[in-house]
Image (cartoon, rainbow, N blue to C red):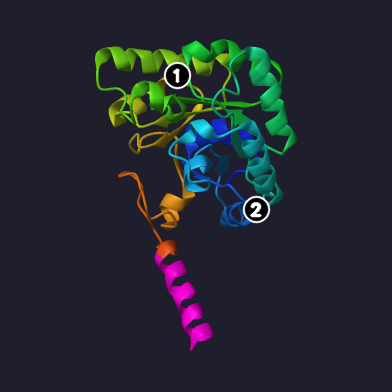
Amino acid sequence: MMTSLNELPQRKSHGPKLAVLTAYDYPTARMLDDAGVDLLLVGDSLGMVVLGMPDTTGVTMEMMVHHTTAVCRGVTRAPVIADLPFASYLTPEMAVENARRLMACGAACVKLEGGVSMLPQIRAIIAAGIPFVGHIGMLPQSVKEEGGYKKKGKTAESIDHLIADAQAIDQAGAVAIVLESIVPAVATQITSLVKASTIGIGAGTETDGQVLVTPDLLGSFPWFRPPFAKARADVAAETLRAVREYMAEVQS
C-alpha cells in the first residue's frame, strides 16, 4: 500500500506491481483509499463515464478542478494523479499554470498525453517542482484526429516512436508513464528501458502496474466496457434491483 511517490522506484525494482484505479468523487475515492489502492487517477475519462460525453475532448479545467477537489477530500494515504484535460497545456506556461491549479486541489502529481512533441510542457512542469506522469500509446484526447481508438506498436515505425516518447519522458524526470493500448511485447520492452514506473491499460501484464477505469471494474457503466477490462462486480444490475424493490414497496 503506497503512501508516497518516493516509493515508486522501490516498487519498480522489487514489486509488488502497482494497482491503480480511477476516482471522480468523494465516496469512491474514500472506499478505494480504504481498500489500499496504490494510486488514484482523476482521469478525464470522467467526461464519458460520469458526464455522458462521447469522448474526453469536452472535459474542461473547471471540471477537473471540481472532481480532483472532491477526490482529494476522500483520500488520506494514496497519492492522487490528476489529468490535464484537452487544450489545457497548449504552451509550457499554460501547462504549468493549470498543473498548479490541480496541485492546489490536493493532487500529488499531474498527467498529460504525448511524448516528444510535448517535451517543452513536460520539462516546464517538472522544472516548476510538480511531479509528472506521462501518457503514451493510444491518446484519448487525440481520438478525433486519429479517427478512433487504435492499438499502438504494430509497425516498426510505431514502435520506434513509442520508445522515443517513453525515453524522452523518462529523461525529463517523469515519476511514471501510462502505456495505453500498446502491443504487450512493446510495453514490456519500454518497461525495461525506462527508470519511471510504467502503468499499463490494455498493454499486457508485464508493465510495472495496471490502471483501470473503476466503473469498468465494478460493472457500474454497462453501456460500454473495453475488451481488456474484467468486471468483478455488477453494480448496474444491483442498482436496478434495489430501485425496483424500492418502487414495488412504495407503489404496493
Magenta residues span 237-252
Q: Is residue 85 visible?
A: yes
Q: Kindly identify which numbered label has been placed on residue 166.
A: 1
Mark 1 lies on a secondary structure that is helix
Quadrant of the rendered structure where residue 228 is?
top left
Q: Is residue 220 above or below residue 89?
A: below
| 248 relative to 132 in the view: left or right | left
Is-magenta flag for residue 243? yes
Q: Kindly identify which numbered label has been placed on residue 26.
A: 2
Q: Is residue 225 above or below residue 203?
A: below
| Residue 179 drawn at (x, y percent) | 42, 29
Q: Residue at x 46, y 15 (%)?
A: 167
Outermost residue, left side: 155
Amino acid type of the residue that numbered disc 2 sits on in the rendered structure? Tyr
Q: Is residue 231 above or below residue 82?
A: below
Amino acid type of the residue that numbered disc 1 sits on in the rendered structure? Ala
Outermost residue, front side: 251
Residue closest to the eye, 215 or 125: 215
Q: Residue at x 54, y 12 (%)?
A: 119
Please report whichever mark, 1 or 2, sits nearer to the chain's N-terminal start: 2
Is-magenta flag for residue 177? no
Q: Is there CB contact under 8 Å for labels 1 and 2?
A: no
Quadrant of the rendered structure where residue 126 is?
top right
Exactly how many numbered labels are in the figure?
Answer: 2
Query: Whole-Å distance between the Cαs marked 1 and 2?
Result: 32 Å
10 Å neighbourhood of mark 1: few (<14), some, or many (≥20)? many
